[in-house]
Amino acid sequence: MKIVVSADHVRAGEIGSCLDCPIGHALRDALPGVEFEVGTIAIHIRHDAEWIAYPLPWYVTRFIQAFDASVDVAPIEFDLPIDLDFDPDPNNTPATVAA
């Protein structure tokens, strides 16, 4: 699955956030209802009670490190080798998960 991190995602991103970073905003658009956390080297996606790690390409890791260091970053695209064989919960958003 192609993940597109737009200029809007970059502007809305929060430094150091595993949910509201630019990658997190792009994932929320691409995978509505899916619970995830963005790490520096992998994205973790919840499937039932299990978290599955999907490694990130090296250049996405560099993007995250630069963004978290307050360096200006440009929009990027990357492939996430994910196959969702479950129906995501459309009500599962960070606000409802945290509540």
Image (tube, grey):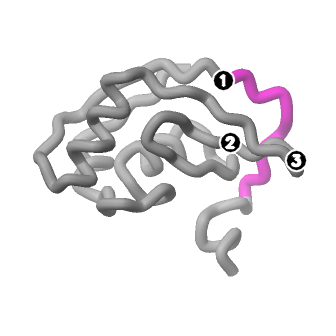
Query: At x 13% / y 48%, what residue is drawn?
Result: 71
Q: Amino acid at mark 1?
A: Ile
Is the residue marked by circle 3 packed among few (<14), some (14-19), or many (20+) residues within 10 Å? few
The amino acid type, in three-letter code, at marker 2 is Ile
Judged left or right of residue 85, residue 82 is: left
Q: Amino acid at mark 3?
A: Asp
Q: Image point 61% across, 18% down: which residue?
A: 81
C-alpha separation, residue under disc 1 versus residue under disc 3: 15 Å
The part of the chain drawn in magenta is 82-90
Q: Do the residues bearing badges 3 and 2 touch, measured as CB atoms within 8 Å?
A: no
Residue 48's label in the rendered image is 3
Eyeballing the image, is 82 above or below 13?
Answer: above
In contact (CB < 8 Å): disc 1 and disc 3: no
Residue 93 drawn above or below residue 64? below
In the picture, measured across the screen, residue 19 lies left or right of residue 97, that is: left
- Which quadrant: the C terminus? bottom right
Instruction: Return the mark for residue 23.
Output: none
Residue 32 is situated, as x and y percent measured from the top left of the image, at 63, 46
Q: Is residue 28 magenta?
A: no
Residue at 29% from the left image edge and 28% from the top image edge: 76
Secondary structure category for the residue under label 2: strand
Residue bearing the label numbered 2: 45
Q: Are marks 2 and 1 in contact (CB under 8 Å)?
A: yes
